[in-house]
Amino acid sequence: VQAAIDIPFSNGLLEGTVNKIKAVKRQMYNRAGIKLLRAKIIYSQ
């Protein structure tokens, strides 16, 4: 908590992107290959 006050940087944007990718991976589980997964990740951004 102290670091959040002292340091002006945040990794919130990266955490949001990782969370979005994980959600897409959960939706796509066992459906298709890496090409479709990559397309869905790029489209969701």
Image: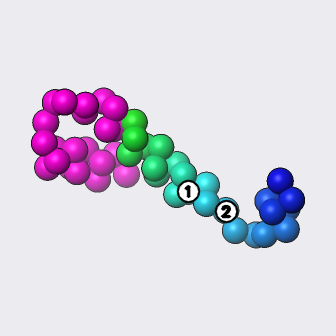
Left or right? Give the position of 8 relative to 6: left
Magenta part of the protein: which range? 24-45
Label 2 secondary element: loop
Residue assigned mark 2: 10
Q: In the displayed structure, would residue 30 be above or below residue 16? A: above
Give the residue at x 47% y 43%: 19
The numbered disc on residue 41 is: none
Q: In the displayed structure, would residue 8 be above or below residue 36? A: below
Residue 38 locus on image (x, y percent): 22, 51
Image quadrant assignment for residue 29: top left
Q: Is 43 in front, or is 33?
A: 33
Give the residue at x 22% y 44%: 37
Give the residue at x 29% y 53%: 42
Q: Main secondary structure of the magenta part?
A: helix
Do tag 1 and tag 2 residues touch (Cβ < 8 Å)?
A: yes
Q: Residues within 10 Å of mark 1 (few under 14, many from 20)?
A: few
Left or right? Give the position of 7 relative to 2: left
Q: Residues within 10 Å of mark 2 (few under 14, many from 20)?
A: few
Magenta-colored stretch includes residue 29: yes
Label 1 secondary element: helix
Left or right? Give the position of 43 relative to 22: left
Residue assigned mark 1: 13
Q: Disc 1 residue type?
A: Leu
Give the residue at x 54% y 52%: 15
Instruction: Tell me the distance, in whole angstroms, between the alpha carbons under discs 1 and 2.
Output: 8 Å
